[in-house]
Amino acid sequence: MVIPRPISGTYRNRKNIASVVLLAILFGLPFVRIAGDPLILLDIPARKFHIFGLTIWPQELHLLHMLLIIAGLSLFFFTALFGRLWCGYACPQTIFTELYDHVGRLFGGSSYGKKAAGRRVWWKVYPAWIILSFLLSFIYLSYFRPFEELAHDLAMFNVFLDGAPAPWAIAFLSLTTFSFVNAAYFRENVCKYVCPYGRFQTALLDQHSPIVSYTLRRGEPRREAHQKVGDHAGDCISCNLCVVVCPTGIDIREGLQVGCLACGLCADACTQVMAKFKKETLIDYRTIKQVDEPTAAVPYIRPRTLIYATLLLVFSTVFGVVLYNRSILHTTVLRDRQLQSLFIADIGYQNGYELHAVNKSKEPLTISVRAADGFELIQPEESYTVAAGELQKIRVIARKRERPPGRFAEPIEFKVQGPDGIQINKSVFSYPEK
Ligand code: SF4
Ligand code: SF4
C-alpha cells in the first residue's frame, strides 16, 4: 500500500482547488432541491432519473445513453488536449484516496504513512476511516434514494423489509466495506491494474498531448549511491523525493508508465529539490514531442482534437434537438390479458386493452383516447387527467361488429389526444376461433 509523503507546490495547490470544488459538488448535489425536485436522483425503484431539472423515464433511456456518450467523448477530447487531467485531478479514486490520507494524518499524526507507524497509529486511523466510509456511503446512496428517507431509515434502523435485509441496507453495508477496503488495501492498485482508462490512455494521447516527464539529457547520469552530491555529471541527486510523493509509488525517471496519473506532484518535489541548487526542475509537464524537442510548439488544433471536437459537437447537437422535441406525454397500448377476445351476440367482437400514459411534465395534463374508424371504444371516461410525473393506466374495450372474412386478427390504432398533438399507438385486434 502506497501512502505518499505530502508535498507543497504549484500542482499540489491546483489539485487542492480541484479537490475542494469537486468534493463540494459531490457532497452537495444530492441535497439540492429545485421546486421540490432533486437536482440529481437516480430513482431506480420508481424508474425515474432526475438530472439537473430533467426527468428521464425508462422509455427515454436513449437520452441517458447519449449523455454517457457525450461524457465519454468529452473525456477523449480533453485527454487529447490536456493529457490525463481526469486521472490526476478529477477521478474519484484519486480524490477519495487523498481524503482518506488527510483523515489518516489528522488522527495518526506525523507517524502516519511512515514505516515506523505502529499499531497505536492504526488503531486511531482505522476507526476514523470506517466513519468516513460510512459517510461516503451515505453520500453515494443519496444519489439513488432521497437523502431524507435514507437518513430516516438509518436513524430508525429500518434495515429489514419483509423479514429480509432491505436492499438499501445491503447496498449501504457493501459500499461502506468497499470504500474502507479500497482505502486500506487497493489504493494505487486500482489505477495500476484495474482501471480500464489507464490501459487505453496511449490510444487517446498523441505526440502533442501533455505528459509528466523527466528530462533525461539533464538528469543523467544521476548520482550513484557511493557518490557525494556534486560528484556526478547529471543533475539528478537521486534523493528519491519524486518517488515518495507519488500516489502510485512509481519512478517517473523510468519513463511514462500506465500507473502515472499525471498529477504533477513529482514535479513539485523536484522543483523544491532543484531550487536548492538554483536549477530548473527535472520533471514537468511536456508534450511527448517536447521531450525530444523542448522548444516544439503545441498545436491545439490538429486532426485528433478536431475529430473529437466534431463528434462532441454532433452528439451534443443531436441531444439538444432530441431534448427540444421531446413530448411531455408518452403513451403505449398493451393487450389486456385478463380480457379474452370475445364474440357477443348483437354486439359483435371485443378485445380489451390497457393504455399506459406517462406525464413527463410538472403539471397535470388532460388526454382523450379514440380508436381508428371501424372500431367502437368503450371506456370509463371521455377524457383523463394524468397527474404530473405519474403513470396512469386506463383499461378500454374495443369492439367491432363485423369480422373481415377469413381473418383471425387485424391491426388496430388508438389515437391519444394530448397537449402537444395526437399520438398513434398500434396494436392487434383478434377474433375468437368461434
Ligand atoms: S509519476 Fe509523478 S505525475 Fe505520475 S502519478 Fe507519480 S507523482 Fe503523479
Ligand atoms: S526529485 Fe529530482 S533530483 Fe530528486 S530523485 Fe527525483 S528527479 Fe532526481
Image (spheres, helix red, strand yellow):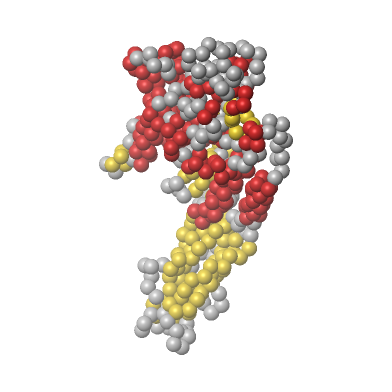
Question: Which sits in the foreground, 378 or 257?
Answer: 257
Q: Residue furthest bottom?
A: 405
Question: Which sits in the foreground, 408 or 290?
Answer: 290
- Up-down: is 250 above or below 341? above
Q: Residue furthest left?
A: 163
Rendered-image quadrant of the C terminus? bottom left
User: Where in the figure is residue 330, as x and y percent of width and height?
Assistant: 55, 59
How many numbered callouts? 0
- Relative placement, left or right, of 283 versus 182 is right
Q: Which residue is found at the position 54% from the left and 50% from the top?
A: 64
Rendered-image quadrant of the N terminus? top left
Q: Is residue 131 visible?
A: no
Q: Toward which corner of the image does residue 281 lie, by quadrant?
A: top right
Question: Which sits in the foreground, 256 or 54?
Answer: 256
- Relative placement, left or right, of 131 versus 224 is left
- Up-down: is 413 above or below 200? below
Q: Toward which corner of the image does residue 424 lie, by quadrant?
A: bottom right
User: Where in the figure is residue 109, as x and y percent of width and height?
Assistant: 44, 13
- Relative placement, left or right, of 307 versus 94 is right
- Up-down: is 313 above or below 261? below
Question: Which sits in the foreground, 431 or 195?
Answer: 195
Q: Is residue 60 visible?
A: yes
User: Where in the figure is residue 296, as x and y percent of width and height?
Assistant: 71, 34
Q: Which residue is found at the position 38% from the left and 38% from the top?
A: 171
Q: Toward which corner of the image does residue 25 lie, by quadrant?
A: top right
User: Where in the figure is residue 309, as x and y percent of width and height?
Assistant: 67, 47
- Up-down: is 429 above or below 108? below
Q: Which residue is found at the position 55% from the left and 20% from the top?
A: 222
